Amino acid sequence: MKKKIIKKNKNLWGGRFSEKPSELMVKINASISFDKKLYEKDILASKVHAQMLSNQNIITKHEENKIIKALDQIQKEIKNNKMKFKNEMEDIHTHIENRLIELVGSIGKKLHTARSRNDQVATDVKLWVREENQIIDNLLKELQKSLIIKAEKNIFSIMPGFTHLQVAQPITLAHHLLAYVNMFGRDRLNIHDLIKRHNYSPLGSAALAGTTFNINREQTASNLGFYSPMNNSLDAVSDRDFILDTLNLSCSIFIHLSRLAEEIILWSSSGFNFINLPEKFSTGSSIMPQKRNPDAAELIRAKSGRVLGNYVALFNVMKALPLAYSKDMQEDKEPLFDSIETTKTALKVMSGMIDEISFNQDNMLNFCNEGHITATDFADWLVENIKLPFRDAHNITGKIVALADKRNKQIHELTIQDYKSIDKRINKEIFKKITLEASVNSRKSLGGTSPENIKKELVFAKEKWLDE
């Protein structure tokens, strides 16, 4: 069965062709369904390009004014859903140019002088990514603020710290929450570095080799907020590192979001019961009326795989492309757009959950009466007071733990006679060392969990992350 062929070709690139592409080609070639969200950036870059062409006497001032006025009208039309998008016109750049020509005639055809869709799309996406990364930075800041506010209220709230998901040592809830403030802070530093590293303009590189026209790329770069033009036209039109770095950033954010989401899921379970899930970010069961499910946290955890998949997908698209532009690069936008939107939504949801979560402090404290949680403090006391090498102290404490297990007790529930049966040098002062409060308060080393440290860390965190 023959594929249907549409006769004649009126595309912007159609001068060399006598027939239109098949309907199947139109379908696979079109990107307007997703790249239409670039319209504001495309119009902005087109205005700047028109101004430069006028300043360089490549078009007249009158032509510049007509083009810019028409571009303003087109922007309003798209914003108000007045433009009809068609797959036959492929992408947002062609839609805008076609409409421009409809409005101002042959003058509109001059706008594409000294540029190509290759440098045009690279510029548009760079502008969009830069703005979206700044939005994500603000959302990360809001999440940090939510965590810091919760930490301020829980400086003295004691909870079990875990290694291998086994009870390890007592810590403060504030200390735990501030760990995530640091994680998301590194993501913000990555954003700042990413923006700086890629803030150079492709515009004016044309298809791949530059242009014969006497253009001013420094002017267009400056007017678009770039530091300067990219200095190699081949690199400028074929570079997608700024997208890969952004997708990598989303992966990093989601690693941190997913870890926090996992803890929320665990803490809300009946086995832990550390938190009360906010109803605004929970769902119920269709059959079990008692259920309150942590679906928001579970979805954040799951979407980390989706975002990672987007990064891997584009990485594979780019890994073997020869210079310069290839249509393969059209596949950069859908994973980018999806990851950005998914990241923004997840950050908003996580901030909302943190704001609304309440902590069951008594349950966290009671959980600390499991797993011999102050055993390390016991060993430290032996080092400090009996002057034992730590490995010897560790061995003695291990024997005391074994004795406590044998008697189905925690080490702090044993008597002084029990301790002395293991080592006669132990005295009653040990009981002061192995309380939960003493354990937490004694962790005064830099970065430790003591409330004294946490108060300083909160001041530092607010100055570093919230006062920028």
Image (cartoon, rainbow, N blue to C red):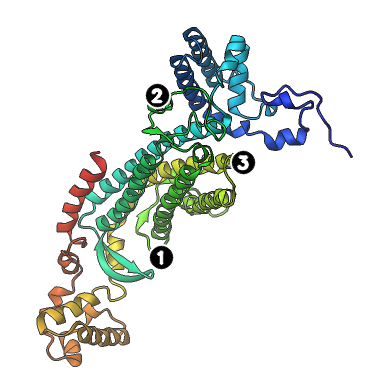
Q: Is residue 256 left or right of residue 160?
A: right
101 shown above or below 198:
above
Q: Which amino acid, mark 1?
A: Gly
Residue 153 rendering spot, x and y as whole percentages: 23, 50
Q: Residue at x 54, y 26 (%)?
A: 115
Q: Residue at x 47, y 48 (%)?
A: 296
Q: Does residue 59 appear in this view?
A: yes
Q: Are marks 1 and 3 in contact (CB under 8 Å)?
A: no
Foreground of the two, 377 or 325:
325
Residue 225 rendering spot, x and y as whole percentages: 38, 29
Mark 2 crowdedness (10 Å alpha carbons): few <14, some 14-19, many ≥20:
some
* Residue 462 position by quadrant: top left
Q: Is residue 331 left or right of residue 465?
A: right
Check disc 1 and report the residue beneath it. Answer: 271
* Residue 48 position by quadrant: top left
Q: Which amino acid, mark 3?
A: Ser
Foreground of the two, 357 or 31:
31
Q: Which amino acid, mark 2?
A: Gln
Earlier-in-chain disc, 2 versus 1? 2
Residue 219: image tag? 2
Check disc 3 and report the residue beneath it. Answer: 326
Earlier-in-chain disc, 1 versus 3? 1
Q: Does residue 292 appear in this view?
A: no
> In which quadrant is the N terminus drawn?
top right
